[in-house]
Amino acid sequence: MIAFSSPVISFCVIFAICIGTQVSATPNGAPVSACSTMTPEHGVPAQTTPSPYVTIPTLMEDESVRLTLMANSSGYSTFKGYLVMAFDKSLGDAAPPIGIFSETVEGTPVLTPANYLNCLSGVKNAATHKDNSAKVIVNLLWIPPYGFVGDVVFKTTFVQNGPSFWVKTLSDVVSISSPTTTTLSTTTTTIITTSTPSGATQLDPWVGTTVLAFFAFLVTLLA
């Protein structure tokens, strides 16, 4: 039997913890530091075989794009993580990500909950997973830059598990043929629209409170 000294045992424990941390890193989505390379910091190289996962873009009538992320190969059914961005195909590999991922577009409800990153001076121009549970399919919404016309390609990094991931899987090209006029809807706007009749003015709560207090004061004086 081989006896190990305490320093050796300590080193092995620390090494095992570090490897475990790398493999299970970023369970709540890719960090902003992954924006430039789209490569997970899992301590192992990316797979070089063709990706068993696909990103399927569907162009909508308002020029927004619905994305479907899923497996497309036998032997693969789920994935745990992803990072997806859109790029102007005419600018080549050096192109920065463009457009915006949104939970709500002109009243369309959220499809699959996701975390959104502000990559390379952009705003919500990347989408990533919220947790590392097994996913069969992910549906997202992407909006082109205002007035954009051209060809767009989506690049997605898929993570099957810690040591198995595929970087920058390419989608089919989507052609935006007319300038987009799609606008974002915020939660606050939605609440006001659904709770306030058409043409009515939405008052701040403090205004109603002040009016009630004034009338109460008048009643006291007249009593």
Image (cartoon, rainbow, N blue to C red):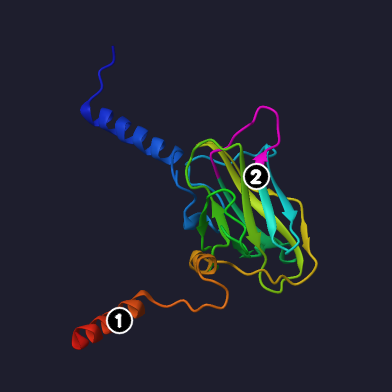
Callouts 1 and 2 close, C-beta under 8 Å: no
The image quadrant of residue 95 is: bottom right
Left or right? Give the position of 113 relative to 10: right
Left or right? Give the position of 199 relative to 33: right
Element at label 2: strand
**Foreground pick, 182 / 95:** 182
- Per the image, the residue denoted by label 1 is 210
Residue 62: percent from left, percent from top: 73, 64
Name the residue located 21 percent from the left edge and 28 percent from the top edge.
Answer: 6
Mark found first going from the N terminus, 1 or 2 = 2
Amino acid at pointer 2: Leu
Residue 73: percent from left, percent from top: 70, 33
The image quadrant of residue 142 is: bottom right
Residues in magenta, as a range: 69-81
Name the residue located 44 percent from the left edge and 38 percent from the top edge.
Answer: 24
Residue 133: percent from left, percent from top: 49, 37
Q: CA distance from mark 1 to mark 2?
A: 53 Å
- Mark 1 is surrounded, within 10 Å at the Cα level, by few (under 14), some (14 to 19) or many (20 or more) other residues, namely few
Left or right? Give the position of 7 relative to 28: left
Name the residue located 42 percent from the left edge and 78 percent from the top edge.
Answer: 203
The quarter of the rendered structure image containing the C terminus is bottom left
Element at label 1: helix
Question: Where 48 sits versus 186, above or below?
Answer: above
Amino acid at pointer 1: Thr
- Per the image, the residue denoted by label 2 is 69
